[in-house]
Image (cartoon, rainbow, N blue to C red):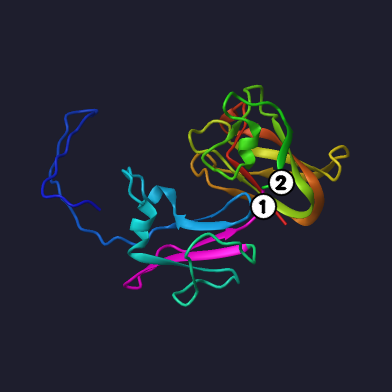
Amino acid sequence: MVEASRFRLRVLESRATPVLTTVGAYLVPVRPPQLAIQPDLDGKVEIKPHQHEFGWKPHGEDVLANLTSDYRIYYTVDGSNPTVKSQLYTGAFLPTASIIKAVAIDREGQRGAPVEETLGIAKRNWKVVSSSGAREKFAADKAIDGNENSFWHSQSTGADQFIEIDLGRDYAVSGFAYTPQRKHGEGMMAKGLLKVSLDGKNWQDAGSFEFGNLINDPSKRKHLFGNKVNTRYIRIISTEITGGGNSLSIAELDFYN
């Protein structure tokens, strides 16, 4: 929403002579924003407006504080849908359960879109053991740094790329999530294989996976195993890249127990 007494429309490019019949300005009620539930490397959870909700320059202002002045965030950890009677979010917290649900509600009781997130294993003690290589400034450890805006990007050597991760100790893993990078459409993992190991030497197959429509919908994708797998080391191998690409990019990997 902007406040102004005059507006100017400039057409900078056009395939033909621009023709306008009417131009109008409308006052549309602002709904509470969509939220994002974001754990840090230690598993501490922060709930805040999804990044696309405010793309303007803050100019030194506290954007989040300005936004939350007109609504409150409520969340649950017991699987129930949040209401104004649920826990009020006041700052980052360590959750007591793996499923977090949250919603923003304004002073008039209008609700934003509810959001739900299944939390994975905390990443503080993870490390990348090896990978098929990386481009400069796109190291493999960016795939597990907890930041979806950074990403690992392999060299352009073919569709068969891999990354091997040490979770720090043994876990009963139920599945994983792949978040593709959204800077451009290169390197999205359409198909792949998983291998697991307790010692990093003896490997077992843990199945294959396939993610569709990544170019049009580059959202986080989840793959759950039929049964939990006891492992400490996990190797993800790409076998097909969208658009017939020859490099792999990963913004973030998550594993669930």
Pointers 1 and 2 in contact (CB under 8 A)? yes
Q: How many marks?
A: 2
Q: Is residue 122 above or below residue 87?
A: above
Spatial separation of the CA atoms under disc 1 and disc 2: 8 Å
Q: Residue 250 or 126: which is nearer the viewer? A: 126
Q: Is residue 161 magenta?
A: no
> Is 22 on the left or on the right of 182, as rendered?
left
x, y percent for residue 2 = 22, 51
x, y percent for residue 188 = 58, 36
> Is 153 on the left or on the right of 52, as rendered?
right
Q: Residue 131 or 69: which is nearer the viewer? A: 69
Task: Read off the residue under disc 1.
Answer: 122
Q: Within 10 Å of the Cα at label 1, are there few (<14), some (14-19), or many (20+) other Cα atoms?
A: some
Q: Is residue 163 above or below residue 82?
A: above
Residue stretch rendered in magenta on the structure:
99-123
- At mark 1, the secondary structure is loop
Q: Residue 125 or 234: which is nearer the viewer? A: 125
Q: Is residue 112 magenta?
A: yes
Task: Read off the residue under disc 2.
Answer: 125
Q: Is residue 34 above or below residue 168?
A: below
Residue drawn at (62%, 22%) of the image: 156
x, y percent for residue 96 = 64, 66
Q: Which mark is residue 215?
A: none
Residue drawn at (36%, 52%) of the image: 62
* Quarter the C terminus occupies: bottom right
- At mark 2, the secondary structure is loop
Residue drawn at (65%, 33%) of the image: 140
Amino acid type, mark 1: Ala
> Is 22 on the left or on the right of 119, as rendered?
left
Amino acid type, mark 2: Asn
Residue positioned most to the top = 157
